[in-house]
């Protein structure tokens, strides 16, 4: 039970820690990626706007006015060749300044060759001298543009004002951000994989002490060790030490209980022997009939008391063995072969055929040898008493023992009653002496199971299986 609990706890902790760690890594990388993408997008946007401002400065520097105050720009003086390529995504334009309404005739007084036959339409805006304003507008073919405008005035005596506009395709910044997002996603995916491997390794190494503790519990549960053995880290060593101290106290308590039970049996042995001797003397033929009857009654009661003492001593020993953390072990096949020889002699006058079939000759049962001998001996003896000619004993690969006889069998209702705990229907039956119900109680102490059913041979089938794996 402890082994299964600890194994389940370790597996649960391992997967929980790994899942929590991976979830934390994924969340941190997602937030990091989102933050980096936003920062990069903002940087690209600022850089894009700064580039437009530089081009607006260049356009302003190349702007001249003729004698009538009309703007003049020589395209050959502009350094960016994209101004000359039609629909290149880089545009400039000179409009008549109209802060409230902007008629169509006021737009595009001068414009770059890249606009071809198109004219940029900006919303009416009040732009103070020296200021610049940004606008998102629709450009040629409906492409989104980012435009920057500035108001300039010709020298006196002209009083007109003009708006210089420089625009660029906004998808350039968006495409750069998307390319960065793809590269960033791939990089974060690779980083996620590496961090996942690192987290798995960390969890594996971090839970190594629990695996060592599991192996120690397995060794304890299988009977190879009487204590938890191994070197554990400072966080787990107190647990192992406390567990070993608990085992030590339990064994000391069991030893005291056994000693006290033995002392009680020894203390009662002499008075019972005296009573038995007195009863035997009273039943001699020379005694009066009344005295013989009294002696017979005393002897019967002494025999009953002796049976109860033997039973409780055996039960105390079995309970102590079952409660011990160190699992007992007893070879099945040699025990069965020994009982086969004994029963063949006990029932020799009936010429019974007692056979044994075992799937594995090396199987061991998790039970004390004396208790295994008593349980199997009682079952085999019961089968021999009622069998007509044959008793068949089989041991399967799991170590379960099945005993079949060809006797009259037992009705189903009575079988269920005989297997109930506390029922001792055959307590006075001569033989090895414990009875089917007491065998069931012993099986329960060891976590085993006794089941009765109809045998294929026609009689009773008794099956004794263990609650744990055998080896």
Image: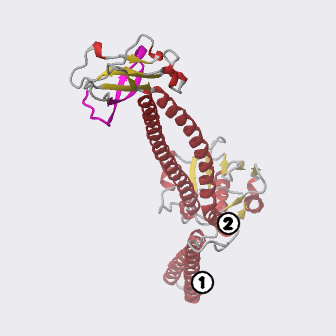
Whether residue 393 can be seen here = no
Work out whether residue 230 or residue 401 is closer to the camera in this orientation and state it: 230
Q: Quadrant of the N terminus?
A: bottom right
Comparing labels 2 and 1, the label whose residue is closer to the camera: 2
Q: Earlier in the sequence, mark 2 or mark 1?
A: 2
Q: Give the quadrant of residue 350.
A: bottom right
Q: Position of residue 355 (x, y in %)?
A: 76, 50
Using the image, determine if residue 85 lies above or below residue 368: above
Using the image, determine if residue 215 lies above or below residue 197: below
Packing grade of label 1 (10 A; few <14, some 14-19, many >=20) is few
Q: Which mark is residue 50?
A: none
Work out whether residue 114 or residue 235 is closer to the camera in this orientation and state it: 114
Span shown in magenta: 125-151
Q: Is residue 99 left or right of residue 280?
A: left
Whether residue 14 can be seen here = yes
At numbered mark 2, what does the secondary structure look like: helix, strand or loop? helix
Q: Position of residue 4 (x, y in %)?
A: 57, 58
At numbered mark 1, what does the secondary structure look like: helix, strand or loop? loop
Packing grade of label 2 (10 A; few <14, some 14-19, many >=20) is some
Total labels drawn: 2
Q: Position of residue 437 (x, y in %)?
A: 53, 60
Work out whether residue 276 or residue 221 is closer to the camera in this orientation and state it: 221
Q: Position of residue 413 (x, y in %)?
A: 47, 47
What residue lies at 41% left-to-right and 26% top-to-bottom?
A: 63
Work out whether residue 318 or residue 19 is closer to the camera in this orientation and state it: 19
Using the image, determine if residue 361 lies above or below residue 111: below
Q: Which residue is mark 1?
A: 284
Q: Which residue is mark 2?
A: 219
Using the image, determine if residue 285 lies above or below residue 231: below
What residue lies at 40% left-to-right and 19% top-to-bottom?
A: 139
Going by the picture, which residue comes out furthest to the top?
A: 117
Q: Does the segment drawn in magenta span residue 14?
A: no
């Amino acid at each position: 039970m402890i082994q299964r609990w600890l194994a389940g706890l370790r597996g649960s902790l391992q997967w929980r820690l790994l899942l929590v760690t991976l979830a934390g890594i994924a969340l941190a990388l997602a937030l990091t990626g989102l933050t980096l993408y936003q920062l990069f997008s903002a940087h690209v946007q600022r850089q894009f706007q700064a580039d437009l401002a530089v081009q607006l400065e260049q356009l302003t520097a190349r702007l001249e006015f003729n004698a009538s105050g009309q703007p003049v720009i020589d395209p050959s003086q502009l350094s960016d060749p994209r101004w000359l390529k039609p629909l290149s995504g880089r545009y400039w334009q000179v409009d008549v300044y109209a802060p409230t309404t902007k008629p169509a005739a006021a737009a595009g007084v001068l414009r770059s060759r890249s606009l071809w036959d198109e004219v940029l339409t900006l919303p009416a805006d009040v732009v103070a001298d020296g200021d610049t304003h940004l606008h998102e507008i629709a450009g040629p073919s409906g492409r989104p543009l980012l435009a920057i405008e500035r108001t300039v005035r010709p020298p006196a005596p002209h009083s007109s004002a003009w708006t210089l506009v420089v625009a660029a395709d906004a998808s350039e910044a968006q495409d750069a951000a998307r390319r960065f997002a793809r590269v960033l996603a791939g990089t974060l995916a690779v980083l996620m994989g590496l961090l996942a491997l690192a987290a798995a390794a960390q969890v594996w190494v971090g839970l190594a002490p629990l695996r060592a503790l599991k192996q120690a519990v397995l060794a304890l549960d299988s009977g190879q060790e009487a204590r938890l053995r191994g070197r554990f880290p400072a966080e787990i060593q107190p647990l192992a030490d406390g567990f070993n101290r608990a085992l030590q106290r339990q064994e000391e308590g069991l030893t005291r209980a056994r000693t006290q039970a033995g002392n009680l049996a020894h203390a009662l042995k002499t008075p019972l022997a005296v009573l038995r001797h007195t009863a035997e003397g009273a039943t001699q033929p020379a005694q009066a009939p009344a005295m013989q009857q009294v002696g017979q009654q005393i002897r019967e009661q002494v025999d009953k008391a002796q049976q109860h003492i033997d039973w409780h001593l055996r039960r105390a020993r079995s309970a102590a063995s079952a409660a011990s953390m160190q699992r007992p072990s007893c070879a099945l096949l040699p025990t069965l072969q020994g009982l086969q020889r004994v029963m063949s002699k006990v029932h020799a006058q009936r010429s019974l055929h007692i056979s044994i079939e075992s799937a594995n000759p090396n199987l061991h049962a998790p039970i004390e040898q004396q208790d295994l001998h008593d349980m199997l001996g009682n079952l085999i003896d019961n089968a021999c008493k009622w069998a007509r000619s044959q008793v068949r004993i089989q041991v399967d690969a799991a170590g379960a023992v099945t005993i079949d006889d060809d006797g009259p069998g037992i009705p189903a209702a009575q079988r269920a009653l005989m297997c109930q705990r506390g029922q001792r229907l055959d307590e006075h039956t001569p033989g090895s002496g414990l009875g089917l119900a007491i065998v069931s109680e012993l099986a329960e102490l060891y976590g085993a199971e006794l089941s009765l059913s109809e045998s294929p041979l026609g009689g009773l089938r008794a099956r004794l299986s263990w609650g744990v794996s055998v080896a």
